[in-house]
Amino acid sequence: MTLAEQPFHESTASIEVSVQERTPWWEYFTFSRDHKVIGIQYLVTTFAFYLLGGALASLVRAELATPDSDLLPPEWYNGSFTMHGTIMIFLWIVPAVTGGFGNYLVPLMIGARDMAFPTLNAIAFWMIIPGGLLLISSFFVGPASTGWTAYPPLSILTEQHAGQALWIFSIIILGTSSILAAVNFIVTIWSMRMKGMGLFDMPLFCWAMLATSVLALVATPVLAGALILLAFDLLAGTSFFNPTGGGNPIVYQHLFWFYSHPAVYVMILPVFGIISEVLPPHARKPIFGYKAIAYSSMMICALGLVVWAHHMFTSGTPDWLRVFFMIATLLVAVPTGIKIFSWLATLWGGKLRLASPLLFAIGFISMFVVGGLSGVMLGSVPIDIHVHDTYFVVAHFHYVLFGGSVFGIYAGIYHWFPKMTGRMLNETWGKIHFALTLIGFNLCFFPMHILGLQGMPRRVAQYDPQFAEINLICSIGAFILALSTIPFIINAVYSWFNGAKAPSNPWKALTLEWTTDSPPIPHNWHGEPPLLVHPYDYGTVDYEKLNQLLADHEASNLVPNH
Amino acid sequence: MKRQTLLSVIILIGLVISASIWYGQNHGLLPIAASEEAVLYDKLFSAVIAIAFGLFLIVQGTLIFSLFRFRKRQGDEADGIPFHDNIRLEMIWTAIPTVIVLWVALYSFDVYSTMRGTDALMIAHHMHHHPKSVLVAQTEGPLPDVSSDTVNISVQGMQFAWIFNYPNDITSGELHVPVNKHIHLDLSAVDVLHAFWVPQLRLKQDTIPGSPTHLDFYPTRIGEYPVVCAELCGSYHGGMRTTMIVESEADYQKWLNEQMEVAQADHSPKVATAKMSESEYLAGKLNQPMHHHH
C-alpha cells in the first residue's frame, strides 16, 4: 500500500507526524530536552569558545614571536595563556566530545529515543553558558593569571584576586555540568540499549563514552572539593594550602591532578571512539579487534585513575611514589598501543575513501602517536625531571589534545555533519581545511619539543634569544593554524543552509544512526529502530538485501499491519 | 606468508632498527652535558628516543603505505577484505609494548637511583619507620658522600630572583660551584613555588614555601650555565634567571675569598638580586605599575 492509497484518517495521522518531524530552528535556542538539539547546542556553543581560546593562543604566540616581553603587559600575558588553557579544556574539548558528540550519538547508536534523563541533560547544557560567561567576565576585572593549574600559594597571593575567584566559581559550575552529564551517559548506556543489543554489540563510541563517564564521575568531584578549599583560602583567609598558616600547597597538587590527569582521558577517550566509528565505513573494513578496543578503553579508565602524581615528579614527591606512578604511567602505553595498532589493521587491506572524515582520522592517528610516544618519555621519572614544565610538555599535550582530540573532533564533524544537518559539506574546502590544519599544527608544535629539551621553560613571556628562530617558526605555524579555521567555518555555515541535500546514509555506514532520516525526526525512528546488522559488518553485508530490509521495515512502520 | 614477503618484512624491520639506533646516537636534541647525572640521563634518553623513533617510523610508514596501496580505485565500490581479528598479531602488539615499557621503567629506575645516590625504593622502607612528613623523610636517605668533598649551598627562590647562601655569610646572586665535587643544594622558597632548573645538569627541583627540598649533583665540566625558574611564579617568571658558574677548585676558592671580604665589610643584611636587573625585567613596559619586589 502506498501513502496515496491510505484511508483518509490514516493519512491525516501521517501528516501530523510529518509536522512534528522537523525540529524548528528556534528550538536550538530553548531549554530543549531533545538529545539531538542538546548535542548540537553543545557543539556550536563550544566551537564559539574554541575560537576565543584560539584567539588567546594567537596572542600568546604573537608575544613569543620575539624573545623580549614586548607586546602584552606581563599580567595579561599570563592571563592569556591561563584563559587559553582553561577555555580549551573546560569549554571546548570536554563539553564538545562528551556533551556534543556523546549526546547526539549515544541514543541514536543504541536505538534509544533519548537520554535516560532528558531534563537533567538540558540542565547540564545550560550550566555551560553561565559558566563560560562567568569565566569571560573575568577579563573585565583582570583574568586569572596563575595557569590553568592555579597552584597555590601563587593563586592565593595573586593580584588578580577577583579574576581568580571568578575562575574558581566558573570551573565548579562547569565541573558540575560534567558530573551530571556523566551520570546520564552511564545510565543511558547501561539501561536504554534497544532489545537485542548487548554490550558487545554496541558501537565502540558507546564503550568509549562509558569509560569516559566513569572517569568523569569519579574524578570531577575531587576537583570541585579542591577548588572549594582554594576559594576559602583566597576569599576567607583560611590556610588549607597556604604554608604561612600551616597549610600544604602540595596537597592541592594531588587533588588537582587526581581530577586533571583523568581529564586528559575524558578529552581523548570519546575521540578514540569517534575514530573507531569513522575508520570502518570510510575504509570499507570491519573494525579490527573490537573487543580489544572496548577492553582497552576500560583499562585506560582504570589506569588513568592511578597516574596523577606523574605531574609532580619535581614537587618533592617521595621516591617510592615516583617509581609507582612511573610504572603505572608507562603501562597506559599498552592499551593505547592496542588501539593504534588495531586502527592501522583496520585501514590495512581496505578501500580507503579519502574524503575529509578519513583524512582527519588518519591525521589523528599520525599526530596522536607523536603525543603518545612523548608521553612514554615523560612517564620516565629521570627524563621528566629535565623536561617538566618546559616546551617539551607543551608540545606533548598539544599533540594529544590538538593532534589527537581536535583532529578527531573534525573527523567527527565531517562524518556526522550530513546526519546532523541534512546537508553535505563541501569536499574541496574540507581538503583545504585539512591541509592547512596539518601544516600549521606541525609547524607550530613540532619544534616545541626541541625548545623544551634545549632549555626553554613554559609560561614565560621572555626567553633566551638563542631560541628566537624556533619560536618564530612556531608562531608562524600558529597563525597558519588560526587561518585554517576560516575555510571550515565558511564551509560549515554555507553548507548548513545551501549544501547538497544529504541522504539518510551518505557513507553506506552500518551503525544505527544512519538508518533514520538526515536530520533524524524528534524521537529518532518511526516505530522500532531497524537493528539488522552488527555495527562493523563491512565486507560481509549484502547491501541490496540490507536496503530492501530497511525499506520493508520503514514501510511496516508507516503503515501498521493489522 | 610467502617467502618473498617474509624477506621484505625482515629487511624492513632491519632498516627500521638501524635507523632507530642511528637516530638514538645522533639526535642532537640535548644541550651540553655538564654533570655526571647529565651523562646518565643522556644514555637513557638516547635509548628511549631510539625506541620512540622506531615506533614512529613503523606507524607513519604504515599510514603512508596504506594511503597509497589501499586507496579506493575509481569505479571500485566493493568493500575491503573483512578480516577483523588475529589473536597472534594482537598478542604480539600487546606483549612487545609491555616488554618495552617495563624495560624503560627498569632502566629509568636504575638511572634515577644512581642519580639520587640511593636505591629509590629503600626510601619507602625507611619511611615506614619514620612517620614524618614525606618531604622530610626524603632527606633521611643516605646522602652521597657527606664529607669534605661535598659543598653545601642553600638556595632561596623568591619573586623574581635566586639567592645563594654559602657558609660564612656569603650571599650571591650567581651560583658558583667547584668542578668535580659533590654539590648539595638545600632549596627553599620565600613566597610562592619556584623550580630550580639547570638544563645542562638535566636536573630540576621545585622550591616549596614551608617545605625544604634538596638537590645533589656532580658537575664535571667548567663553564657558565643558565639557572632557570621552571615553575610559574608570577608576572616576571620568564625573567627569573641567573647563571651557574662551574669553575676549577682554585678559581672557586678565589671567588669565595673575595666574597668573604665583601661579607665582612658589609654586615648589614644583604640580598643580591639575580643577574638580570629589575630594569631588565621591566624593559619595554615602563608604563606598567611596579610589581612588589624584594
Image: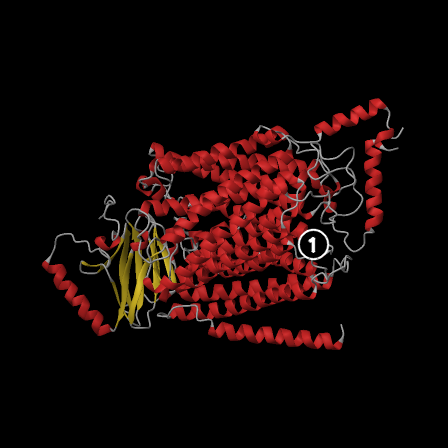
**Residue sitting at 28 percent across and 57 percent down?**
B155
A476 or B262: nearer the viewer = A476
Residue B13 visible, this angle: yes
Residue A502 image-quadrant placement: top right
| Residue A352 image point, x, y percent | 69, 59
Image position of B264 (left or right of A383): left
**Mark 1 crowd level (few <14, some 14–19, many ≥20, 10 Å Cα):** many
**Residue sitting at 63 percent across and 73 percent down?**
B13
> Which coloring applies here?
secondary structure
What residue sits right under mark 1 in the picture?
A282
Name, please, the residue furthest toward the top. A9
**Residue sitting at 31 percent across and 72 percent down?**
B180
Q: Is residue A482 above or below residue A344?
A: above
| Residue B274 image point, x, y percent | 24, 57
Chain name for mark 1: A
A163 or A292: nearer the viewer = A163
Q: At label 1, which amino acid type do we have? A: His
Image position of A379 (left or right of B95): left
Name, please, the residue furthest toward the front. A498
Residue B145 image-quadrant placement: bottom left
Image position of B181 (left or right of A18): left
| Residue A426 image point, x, y percent | 62, 49
Quadrant containing the C terminus of chain A in the rendered view: top right
A307 or B149: nearer the viewer = A307
Label 1 residue SS:
helix
Image position of A392 (left or right of A29): left
| Residue A272 image point, x, y percent | 62, 51
Residue B142 visible, this angle: no
**Residue sitting at 83 percent across and 49 percent down?**
A544
Q: Is residue A113 above or below residue B275?
A: above
